[in-house]
Amino acid sequence: RQDQIASMFGVSRIPVREALARLESQGLIDYHRYRGAVVSSLSLDEIAETHDFRALVETEVIRRSVGNMTAETLRQARIYAGEFAATSDSAEWARTNRLFHLTLYRDCGQSYHLEIVSNALDKIAKYLRAQLVLTGGIEKAIREHDAILTACEHREADVAADLTKAHILGASRSLRHFLEAERSPTSPVLKQRRKAGVEPPALPSKILSGHESSGPSRKTE
């Protein structure tokens, strides 16, 4: 509730209300009558829909951006790709992934598209952390980032668009398959939890909140 948050941080309700409104617009919280704001949760279908939307929009955005990319854009994108590859902090994965993609899109000349993409990336950030941490997908993401950036450097707009689409949809499939397996009645983990009378959450709260300080050891494929 707004008054509780305001009291906790020693501020008025106005900045709290503005912050919650921004989080709601990004799909990160939901308002419930008598309960206040709660962290939102996406179903498997919503995860698929959000990634499908990203693939549709971002494919065209990067296609239009490639021909206009400056040397500075490519240099900055290479820096973010390197930071993404170097960190083992799941929150940093989400941050540097967002910066990498938005940098490659910024020369598209379509501010409205960029705003939509930015909001979509904000909404899916916590699920990106989950996808990378739970499925060991960091090495694959690193390779895909490098391939996308290389295509941009070579001014191959269609190749960059196809690689971006495959990158986004691949992440969606990976996360959904993992969650479907975990929720399956035959899942050993699920059986053990139900035997103990505990229902598993949709996704680990530490990962969703960004409090997971480091990911697992990286897997090579």
Image (cartoon, rainbow, N blue to C red):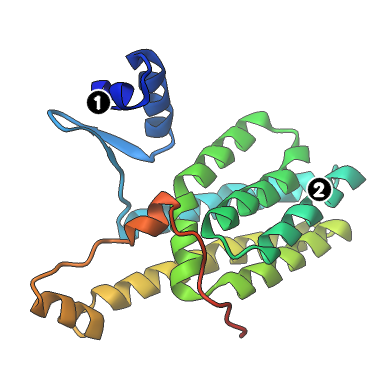
Q: Nearer the viewer, residue 216 or 200?
A: 216
Mark sitting earlier along the chain (2/1): 1
Instruction: Using the rendered view, name the quadrant where residue 175 is placed.
Output: bottom left
Q: Position of residue 96 (x, y in %)?
A: 64, 52
Name the residue at 38% across, 17% down.
11
On screen, residue 59 above or below 19: below
Q: Position of residue 90 (x, y in %)?
A: 53, 60
| The N terminus, quarter of image | top left
Q: Nearer the viewer, residue 106 or 76?
A: 76
Q: Nearer the viewer, residue 61 or 26?
A: 26
Q: Secondary structure at mark 1?
A: helix
Residue 164 as seen in the image, left or right of residue 71: left
Q: Which residue was labeled with disc 2?
A: 76
On screen, residue 34 above or below 214: above
On screen, residue 83 above or below 142: above
Q: Which residue was labeled with disc 1?
A: 4
| Amino acid on which disc 1 is placed | Gln
Instruction: Using the rendered view, name the quadrant where residue 179 is placed.
Output: bottom left
